Amino acid sequence: MNEQSDFASRRAWMVEDQIVGRGISSPLVIEAMRRVPREKFVTRSMMDCAYDDGPLPIGAGQTISQPYIVALMADALDLKGGEVVLDIGTGSGYAAAVLASIAARVFSIERIPELADAAAKTLAAEGYDNVVVRCGDGTLGWPEQAPFDGICVAAGAPVVPESLKQQLSIGGHLVIPVGSVHTVQSLRRITRVSDTEFRSENLGDVRFVPLLGEQGWS
């Protein structure tokens, strides 16, 4: 078995065991997880661990999230295809690639310049031409591209940033971990019901790096 087919086999196992096996049922999310080559979004030294059931270091004190958490957050956005999505905390670009496999366009923000640059290069090399990456403060969102049908935040905030809530379209979902940097956080789904009304749901406990920025942790 060559390396490419070996990774494809591991990816298929990961989807069945970690994703479908834990209750993710969206066909679009499952197919995206089957297609995106996670091994391309980790460091070379971590490639053999790409499909392990856990997060992995990607440098600069950051991690690529556990595959199941990426799938859970994508599933919570309830995408049907054709949406415009904001991805906060690009990291290696893996979650952006998963979202881009479903949505029409993904705008992704990473605060660490070297990670933003590397992710943009990887995404381009893998053919994800519907993703735009920029370096900046993710807590402020991307106002000039708003409103967004979905917003996905891969870092834990002290509270839900008001900027992100205001950049959601009516009926859109914001998925974000909220809570202390020292304990587990709760994964929240915020749905914009109207111009002034938002509904919040708790999707369970998670642990993420802190969301730094003007409307996050200092």
Image: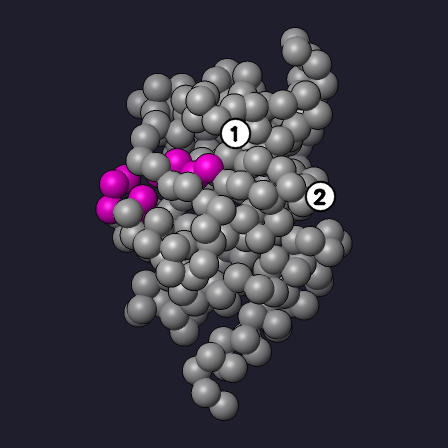
**Looking at the image, is 96 positioned above or below residue 1?**
above
- Magenta range: 107-116
Q: Can you name the residue that lies furthest to the bottom here?
A: 1
Report the front residue among 209 and 74: 74
Q: Position of residue 83 (x, y in %)?
A: 62, 38
Residue beneath disc 1? 178
Task: Give the residue drawn at x 55%, y 16%.
Answer: 166
| Residue 40 seen in the current view | yes
Up the image or down, 17 lies above or below 78; here it is below
Query: Residue at (39%, 36%) from the top-left corner?
Result: 109
Label 1 or label 2, whichever lies nearer to me, is 2
Identify which amino acid the numbered label 1 is placed on.
Val
Helix, strand or loop at label 1? It is strand
106 is within the stretch colored magenta: no
Residue under the point 50% across and 81% down? 6
Q: Is residue 216 above or below residue 205?
A: above
Q: Which residue is mark 2?
A: 80
What's the mark number on residue 43? none
| Residue 199 in picture, x, y percent from top left | 70, 21
* Residues at marks 1 and 2, CA–CA distance in whole angstroms: 26 Å
Residue type at mark 2?
A: Lys
Check disc 2: other Cα within 10 Å, few if <14, some if 14-19, many if 20+.
Answer: few
Regarding mark 2 in the picture, which secondary structure is present there? loop
Q: Residue at x 60, y 33 (%)?
A: 150
Image quadrant in which you'd find residue 135? top left
Q: Is residue 182 left or right of residue 205?
A: left
Question: Would residue 110 be counted in the magenta stretch?
Answer: yes
Is residue 218 depicted above or below 90 in this figure?
above
Q: Earlier in the sequence, mark 1 or mark 2?
A: 2
Q: Quadrant of residue 25 in the image?
A: bottom right
